[in-house]
Every structure is written in structure tokens, then in C-alpha cells.
Image (cartoon, coloured by chain):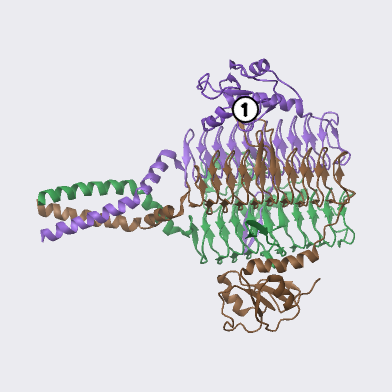
Chain colours: A brown, B green, C purple
Amino acid sequence: MIKLNLDEIVSLTGGRLLRAGQAEEITGVASLDEAGSTDVSFLGNEKYYQDFLQTAAGVVLIPPAVPENPDGQTTSALIEVENPSVAFGLVVKKFVSAQRKFQPGVHPSAIVAEGVQFDPEKVSIQAGVIIESGVRIGAGTEIGAGSVICHDVSIGENCLLHANVTVRERCILQNEVVLQPGAVIGSDGYGYALVDGRHETIDQVGIVLLEDRVEVGANSTIDRARFGKTVVGEGSKIDNLVQIGHNVRIGKHCLIVAQSGLAGSTHLGDYVTMAAQTGAVGHLKIHDRAVLSARAVASKDMKGDTVYMGMPGRPIQEEQKKKAAVARLPKLISQVKELQKRVDALDSSES
Amino acid sequence: MIKLNLDEIVSLTGGRLLRAGQAEEITGVASLDEAGSTDVSFLGNEKYYQDFLQTAAGVVLIPPAVPENPDGQTTSALIEVENPSVAFGLVVKKFVSAQRKFQPGVHPSAIVAEGVQFDPEKVSIQAGVIIESGVRIGAGTEIGAGSVICHDVSIGENCLLHANVTVRERCILQNEVVLQPGAVIGSDGYGYALVDGRHETIDQVGIVLLEDRVEVGANSTIDRARFGKTVVGEGSKIDNLVQIGHNVRIGKHCLIVAQSGLAGSTHLGDYVTMAAQTGAVGHLKIHDRAVLSARAVASKDMKGDTVYMGMPGRPIQEEQKKKAAVARLPKLISQVKELQKRVDALDSSES
Amino acid sequence: MIKLNLDEIVSLTGGRLLRAGQAEEITGVASLDEAGSTDVSFLGNEKYYQDFLQTAAGVVLIPPAVPENPDGQTTSALIEVENPSVAFGLVVKKFVSAQRKFQPGVHPSAIVAEGVQFDPEKVSIQAGVIIESGVRIGAGTEIGAGSVICHDVSIGENCLLHANVTVRERCILQNEVVLQPGAVIGSDGYGYALVDGRHETIDQVGIVLLEDRVEVGANSTIDRARFGKTVVGEGSKIDNLVQIGHNVRIGKHCLIVAQSGLAGSTHLGDYVTMAAQTGAVGHLKIHDRAVLSARAVASKDMKGDTVYMGMPGRPIQEEQKKKAAVARLPKLISQVKELQKRVDALDSSES
């Protein structure tokens, strides 16, 4: 276990010390409501301002807007930083790097087929891993217990595959790829042709390519292409329980949040965000920096630099206007009733 | 295989025998439409009343409201019970307990690291299980084939982990916890910070704590906290393919039904129900006994003792009123057209 | 690697050669935009017509409607076929069959309990597979690395279970069943009874039956019946991350697309389609050839031969009419305002 003093934390975060408080040596990290005098914490969201006022944390990282001596906040050391969440991450990383060690070697229970290409002194193959023939694994890569790497898969350098993942035949993982437990890369795409009343399977002979620094969440599934490649571009991050259909192409630095799904052959540009539980139908183009807010569905091509909402997904202003109009409906109905009465009255006075 | 006679079933269920019928010895359980003369069945839902009239079941457990000699129901023994579903469960449990046996021991193919703490005569470690260093396992616990228990995990007594589950490092399972196959406990939370155009990973150094009698469904995923704990409270039951984000806290005795998702840092009270395919955005508080009906989304804090519907989730009466208003829209549109004509007429007669 | 010439492709697809182009020997398959002179490609969707005009493919399979000598399409051999997607599938299958070989045998690392019934010369058990006691496996079946087959499971002939699947005790897979990686068959149904403030588990003693040619996608979950059977009928295809509740019965030749969920005891007829991210509440009947479009929810029994949309799911025309009416709402609101003014004016001129 490592210890950090206040100066080290200031220097690590690039922050400005506002108040030294009563900080002791720091040995851990915690949320404002759980932290004690030996923990660093941070104020990352104004929702937690009350917690901030009451925290027992030794050190708190705060954003520029917070007053230097907030009422009631009397014991913590305060360090002002540009982005408390990022700064806190740097502290966490310091503790993590002291904790987690990459230990090269092949566990004796691992089943590695003949001819698999890797340097046993530079990769870490955990217990019960199964690596089929034709696989290549780059230096610095760790493969977690119970994972299965099928024939002819290629894995780059410094990848971290957690326990119980499956990578099917011929798929390619470039460098620094992370797979959470249970992720499935290269399952068959869902393709059938109705012939004489039966759904005949359309063979899926392509692969999945995960570019550098792609991360895939727990139990997410990425289907291999019917032919060619399903691609997830450099630096894109996929959360848990996400489904990526065959022949999808995701650009660079996209975020695909939990339980979202992309149907086959849809293409995403760069920096696209799909929030939680969103969907995209097949064969679409969704352009750079488009954002689907939670639960939205892309049902046709979508321009970039726009936030979409609803199903079918529309620019958020339009959708909110529609929602506001619907909220006014009950009032509208009574207005129309009222008008009918008045027109009835006018009509009868007329005749 | 065990056999039960009519008296034993009456006493087991605490019911009242309405009619002895032609019941033979009972050797199994079945639904009304599948049961034969040696099966117990039950009428748990009025939808199945037709099946009840035609069943060949040897014994049927019925609720108080059903007439003693319903027309056409001539052969089954009938036992009146307060709650047929619960009573049936007791009969099932009797058969199950005769069938499933806990067999302690460590399968020779299991890989158990040195120093793992458990009593080999009181736990059951199945084939191909991998247990990394620092793990503790309580008496009466069974770990299913192919499961991976990572470093420093703590598992209490009488837990049942089915096949192919993953529990990542340092997570804590208290007593009588059940994990269905493929469940992932302690995957990294989804946290990134955009730095110079790249999503930098925010380390997730916390854990997951599953309290007593928590159950987690097949292929569900529960992310470890960024720091501190993601908590599922005592007796809460999570269905299949559910996603629980980092730092979520679920209270006691909650029900989270299939394919629901909770975003990070949201807190649920006790006895909260989230029906199937619901969602909750992050950093919310959802209070005791709140119910999200199927597909509802919690997008802000929610009071307890209320049923919510829709997206954004609203009290169900409000949402149903809105839906009713929308259903009246086409009529409203023609009413307005009609009014316009009438006002046109008035206008022209005026001038 | 195999090679095909133009005549072989014409005969394989049953097509008509429109133009011989400059086709060389064909050694692979590719999409229009990725294909080179040694690839077959196809025009399956008019969206790709521009790609077709610019493709470098050696051979393109085209539908009847395309002109024989389209402008700008000058090098590819063109073969007209009834259904290019199906015809292309035949070519792919030719390459696949040359590539993938069924290799019988039991990997020495597999753990097969005593008394498991199978012909070791006719089944393929991959590395790290665990097969518990009482299991039967038919000829021609392959079980992928790391999979777990629990006690008393019965698997028919020519099944393909990919890596890391779990089939729990007593479930039955008939012939030619395919399970993608991570699929879970026979997890416990989600059933609890609230007794004295605690959710008591209702035992789930039934099984799952997958009939001939059923396919189940990656990380999908199918719960065992409370008693009796959860059934997926002959030829039905289930995509990734789908949840099938206990006692569900799915008829023959149904399609259940990714991330859909069926609650307990719902019955589907034959040829029912549930598009992506749909849902069905429990205890329903959805009749033959009903189609739920993406995101639709079945909340009551549904007639067959009808396309449903929305939540609650309604016939698509009705739902679209409602959506159109909502889109007109902002206009309607201003019309009512306008009317109010006019009636005000009439009123004041009246008085």
C-alpha cells in the first residue's frame, strides 16, 4: 500500500492548494459520504454539494466555482482543479498502478495449441484459458481465466481480456483492447433466407475487427460480418450488454452505452454517442458527433452534430416541442369543448 | 423418486380438502393442461379456468373463490388454499428436496490457488472451476462448473453459483447468494474522460457487495464501483440480462426484472420494483415501494409508494390520462375542423 | 482454398449469365465496395446501386430488374438470379464447406463424466468442455471449448454448440440445434412469492426443449419452466441477448431478433416475428404470422397476420395514424387559439 502527502497530491493533480485543512497521509480514495481522514475525495457534480459540506475526507478536489471557505466545510484540505473527476482519476491511477501487476507466464492449466505465436515471457495466460491453433498474441497482453480464443485469431499488444470471454475464429484485436468478462466477439450474424417455409442459415464468413484501444463491456456481443468485416474504430468504448450486428462499422472514439443495439450494416461516424438502451435499424449512416439520447431510435440516416430523442429519433428540440404539445392536450380538449358551447350559443342567437 | 398421498398434500399445503376425486398417489407436478392423474397442479390465474375444467390432474390446488363442484370438473381431487401458487411451491419444494443433493468436495480438474480459505468437506467446487489467490468460501457453498472466482473475492455460506459465472477481484457475496449461469459480478464501470480527443479510462477501483439472499439472473452484469461499493441489498432479486451500473445502491427486497438497466450512482430504496425492460438514468433516488411498470424510465427522483409508467416515467394515472387524450386526437382534429366551418359561417353571416 | 470459374458459379446459383466481363478465377466473396477481381459480390438492396456501378468485383449477382449493361458498370461479369442474397449464400456455402471441417474426437482436457452416452468417433468435444453425468450426445454434434453441459441433458445429432455455452440439467436439444457463444439454456425462471416481507424462491423444476434446427444467439438466455417445458419450436431462430421467460412456448419458424424479451407463459404461434428490442408481457397468445415491429410491446393477445407497432402494440396503420395526429398537434393548438379569437370577436360584436 502506498501513501501520498498533500504536496504529492497537489503536484499529481496539477491543482492549486486552497486550504491545508487537517489532512494526514492519504492511503485511499472514497466518495464524499464514505471518505475518512485518510482518503481523497472530489466534488464532481453539484448534486453532491451537501455531501461535500459534511464530508470527513482528508482531501477534497473541487472545481473553480466553489468558494474557498464554504460554510461548514471545516476539516478537509481543499485543492482546486480544472476538472475534479479527471484529477481524482489521476490519484486513483496512482493507487491502482501500485496495486495491479502484470505477471507474464502461461498457467499450467491453460490449453495452448501447437504453433500459437507469442512470447511466453511477455504475455500472461491465466488458468483454464483455451487457445486454439493459428492464434497470435502480442507482448504485454493478458488473457483472463476461462477465456476461449478460437482458431486464427490475432491479438495485438497490451490487450486485457478478462475472464470467460470468447473470441471466435479469425477475428482481429489490435492493441490495448479491453474485453470485460463474458464478452463475445465474432458470433454469427443473424441472417436467414426463407426457402420453402424454412429459415435457411446464411453463412457468416467475415470477421470482427477491434481497432486500438477499443473496450467492450461485460456480456456484450459483436457479430462477425456476413463477409468482410464488422469494425469498431479506434478508441471507441462499448458498455455492457450491447449488441452490434453484422457488418456494422463504428467510427473512432464513439460511446455506445449499456443495452443499446445496432442492426446490421449500419455505419457510425466518429465521436458518435449512443446513450443507454438506444437502437439503430440496419443499413443507416449516423454521422460524426451525432448523439442519441437514452432510449432514442435511429430509423433513418442522421446528420452529425445533432442530439436526437424519441422513436423515431428526431432532433431534441422538435421532440420536446411535441412532448410539450401532448402535455397540453387535456387542456386543449376542454378548450375545444368550451368553444363548441360558445359557437352553439352564437348559432342559436343567430337563428 | 418420492410419492405423496392426498393427506400428505393437504397437510403440506395447509389446505382444506373439498373433494377427494379419483386421486392416486402423486409422483410429480405439472400445469393444468399437461398434468395426468399422478400429478398435482394448481389454478393460479383465472386465465386458466378453461384448462382447469378440462384438466386430468390428480389433484388441483384452488383459491377460495372457486365453486366446490365446478361444472365439468369431475375427476381431480380439489384442495382449497389461500394462495395456490405458494401452496404449489411447497409441493414442488418437497419433490425438489428429494432430488437435488449438495455434494461437498473439490473436483480434481478445479484449479484452486494456494491459500484459498475453505473447508473442502463443506463446500462443493465443480469441474473446471478456477479460484484465484486470496479467496474465501463459506460452508455449504457450491460453485458450478467453469466458473471463475478472481483474487480476494469473499463468498459467504450456502451460496449457489451456477456454471460459467465470473466474480471479479475483491467483490463480496454474503450468505445464500444465487448466481445464474453467465452472470458477471464486478466488471469495470463505464467511465471515461475526454482528454485531447480521446476517451481516457477512469479506473474503477471499488467492488460489488451482494448481501444475503441476493439472486442474480443469467448473463446479468453488475459493475464494480468507481471507488467504494456497488451494493445490492438483502433479499433483492435480479432477473436475466439486467445491467447494474457502477456505484448503484439497491435496497432490500427489490425486484429488478429482465433486461432492465440502472445507470451509475442511482440509489433504490427497499421493496422497489422495476418491471421488465425498464431503465433509470444515473444519480437518482427512487424511494421505497416505488414501482416502474414495464418499459418505464426513471429520469428524475421518484417518490415511493407510487406506480410509474412511460418515458419519462410519471404516475400511472397521469400517464394513462395522457394516453387517453392522445387516443382522442383524431376526433379532436375533426371537431376543430367542424368548428372552423361553423365560425366561418357565422363570420360570413355577420358581415 | 478452392477456386470457382464463371460456369461453376452460374450453375451453382441457377442464374443466367448476362455478361462475361473480365472475370478471372474466383477465390472469395466480398461486399461490392470491398470486392476485387477474384471475388463474387451481389446487389441485394437498391441502396447499394452506387457501389454496384463502381465495384471492382470479378462477378456480381444481380436481380432481374437491373439493366443488362448499366452505365459505368464495365468490368464485372453479371449473373442474373431470382434472389441475389440467397444465390450469394450458395456461393458462400461452397467456400465455407471447403473450409470448416467437422473433426470428431474428445480433447484430452475435456472433463466427461462416467457413463455419458456418445460415440467418440462421431462427436467432437473441444478443449475444456465439461460434461456432467447422465448426458447423451448424438452423432455429428460438436461442443465448443469451455462449454458446460449439466446433468442429464440430452443433445441430438448434428448440433453445433459454440464456446462457453451453458446447458443446465435435464434440458433437451433436438437435432441441428446451434448455440452461439455464451448462450444459457435452462437458467431458473424468475419466480418469487412474497412471504412475511421476503421474496421466497419458487422452485423451477421444469426444463427447456429446443426443437430441430433452433438457433440461439450469443449471450441469450432461456429460462427453464417452473414445471413442464419452456419450448422453442422447430426452425425458430433467436438472435443475441434475447430473454425467454419460463414456460414460454414459441411455435415453429419464428424469428426473435436481438434484445427482445418474452415474459413467462406467453405462447407464440408459428412464423411469428418479433423485431429487435420488442417485448411481450406474460400469459399472452400471439398468433401465427403476427409481426411486432422494432420496439413494439405485446400487452394483450394478438391476432395473427397483422403487423403491430408501439407500446401498447397496435396494428401499424392505427399507430401511424396516431403518430401523424400527434405530429399535427402544434398546428392544432394554434388553430384553436385562432378560433378562440374569432369567437371572442363574434361574441363582442353580438353583445
On the image, the x and y values in percent for residue C198 come to 64, 62
Apparent side of residue B235 relative to residue A98 in the rendered image (left or right): left
Apparent side of residue B331 relative to residue C84 in the rendered image (left or right): left
Q: Is A127 placed above or below A52 here?
A: above
Which of A193 and B202 lies nearest the eye of the viewer?
Answer: B202
Label 1 amino acid?
Answer: Ala
Q: Residue at x 85, y 45 (%)?
A: A118
Q: Is C42 placed above or below A118 here?
A: above
On the image, the x and y values in percent for residue B194 come to 62, 59
User: Is residue A256 shown to the viewer in this render?
Assistant: yes
Q: Which residue is mark 1?
A: C56
Apparent side of residue C244 relative to residue A173 in the rendered image (left or right): left
Answer with the quarter of the image where residue B184 lies: bottom right
Crowd rating for badge 1 (residues with CA inside 10 Å; few <14, some 14–19, many 20+): many
On the image, the x and y values in percent for residue C212 come to 68, 31
Name the chain letter of the residue that bears numbered label 1. C
On the image, the x and y values in percent for residue A193 come to 60, 28
User: Is residue B14 shown to the viewer in this render?
Assistant: no
Mark 1, secondary structure of its residue? loop
